[in-house]
Image (cartoon, helix red, strand yellow):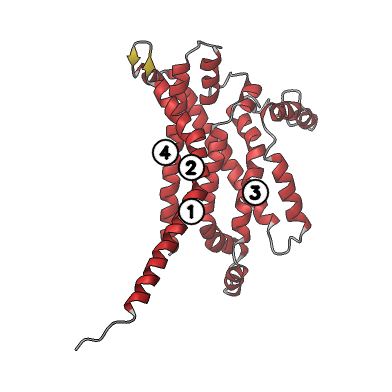
């Protein structure tokens, strides 16, 4: 004999309510994501698609001639200079910014030092372009204040081979605004390092260098990789500072794009589009490598 199941109806009602709740939750998430997706499509996907279409469109129809032009010695040198400059400035800023952030976020740093460094970093990270180029010409140029001051002390940096109007000079200029950016980006990750982990390492006899190498840096590794990608991308896309300092004498991908689009050399918008697509491809490759390194780092920490 089978009895009537009086609990079936309440269970079905509860399941229906859960489904309705999940559906309502999905609608809310979709509604919240819709503006971001629309904005992403307008400012990122559509321009990239237009660049790709422009790069393969010739007067007589589709062509890869403009993409093939990227193999010319000038554009290869521009790509090489851009990558070297970005690696140098990002590496310099990564080390300097990490050191400053570690000092600013020490346990005994108090309240005023972190606040002062954060405030200065927020201002300096946005100081770029032509004003930054003029500031460096006034300080580290051939007749700059710092250059003349060092020369008065018997240190002739230009006689030693340094020049502001080179890739090394550009890397220093870029580091001026990339280092504060690094401080801003990495400081939250440093503050998230739990003090009891450091106290445990200290109680086990680890020196400050060992605590940094064995505890802090492994924890910060994913953030450091992400920060390096951000710094590299900021340097890779820099234009105004490089052009103002070197007047285009050092060929970079950004300055070459400006030349072909403004007609300083030859007006060739399709070539400019092909160069832009190449820059997007390099950044996409770097992001893929960054993601792979980040996943490997997280797996290594488990």
In 3D space, how far apart are the residues under numbered discs 1 and 4 (Cα atoms)? 30 Å
- Name the residue that disc number 3 marks: 184
Question: Does 45 sit above or below residue 216?
Answer: above
Residue 141 appears in view: yes
Give the residue at x 54% y 25%. 254
Name the foreground residue: 288 vs 39: 39
Residue 37 x, y percent position in the rendering: 48, 42
Q: Residue furthest left?
A: 1
- Name the residue that disc number 4 marks: 285
Mark number, residue 29: 1
Question: Does 247 sit above or below residue 11?
Answer: above
Residue 113 x, y percent position in the rendering: 76, 55
First along the sequence among labels 2 and 3 = 2
Indicate the secondary structure of the residue bearing disc 3: helix
Residue 190 x, y percent position in the rendering: 61, 58
First along the sequence among labels 2 and 4 = 2
Name the foreground residue: 209 vs 52: 52
Give the residue at x 37% y 20%. 56
Indicate the secondary structure of the residue bearing disc 4: helix
Indicate the secondary structure of the residue bearing disc 2: helix
């Amino acid at each position: 004999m089978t009895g009537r199941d009086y609990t079936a109806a309440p269970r079905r009602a509860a399941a229906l309510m859960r489904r309705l709740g999940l559906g309502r939750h999905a609608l809310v998430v979709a509604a919240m994501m819709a503006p971001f997706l629309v904005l992403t499509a307008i400012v990122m996907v559509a321009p990239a698609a237009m660049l790709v279409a422009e790069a393969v469109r010739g007067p007589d129809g589709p062509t890869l001639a403009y993409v093939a032009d990227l193999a010319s010695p000038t554009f290869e040198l521009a790509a090489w200079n851009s990558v070297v400059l970005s690696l140098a400035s990002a590496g310099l800023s990564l080390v300097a910014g990490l050191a400053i952030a570690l000092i600013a976020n020490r346990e005994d740093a108090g309240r005023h030092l972190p606040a002062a460094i954060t405030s200065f970093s927020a201002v300096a990270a946005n100081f770029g372009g032509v004003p930054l180029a003029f500031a460096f010409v006034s300080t580290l140029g051939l007749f700059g204040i710092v250059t003349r001051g060092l020369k008065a002390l018997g240190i002739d940096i230009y006689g030693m081979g340094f020049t502001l109007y080179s890739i090394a000079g550009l890397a220093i200029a870029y580091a001026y605004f990339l280092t504060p950016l690094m401080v801003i980006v990495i400081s939250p990750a440093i503050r998230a390092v739990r003090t009891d982990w450091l106290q445990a390492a200290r109680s086990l006899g680890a020196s400050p260098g060992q605590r940094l190498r064995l505890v802090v840096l492994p924890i910060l590794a994913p953030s450091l990789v992400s920060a390096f990608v951000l710094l590299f991308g900021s340097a890779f896309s820099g234009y105004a500072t490089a052009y103002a300092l070197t007047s285009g004498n050092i060929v970079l991908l950004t300055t070459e794009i400006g030349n072909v689009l403004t007609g300083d050399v030859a007006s060739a918008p399709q070539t400019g589009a092909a160069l832009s697509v190449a820059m997007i491809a390099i950044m996409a490759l770097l992001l893929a490598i960054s993601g792979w390194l980040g996943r490997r780092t997280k797996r290594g920490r488990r």
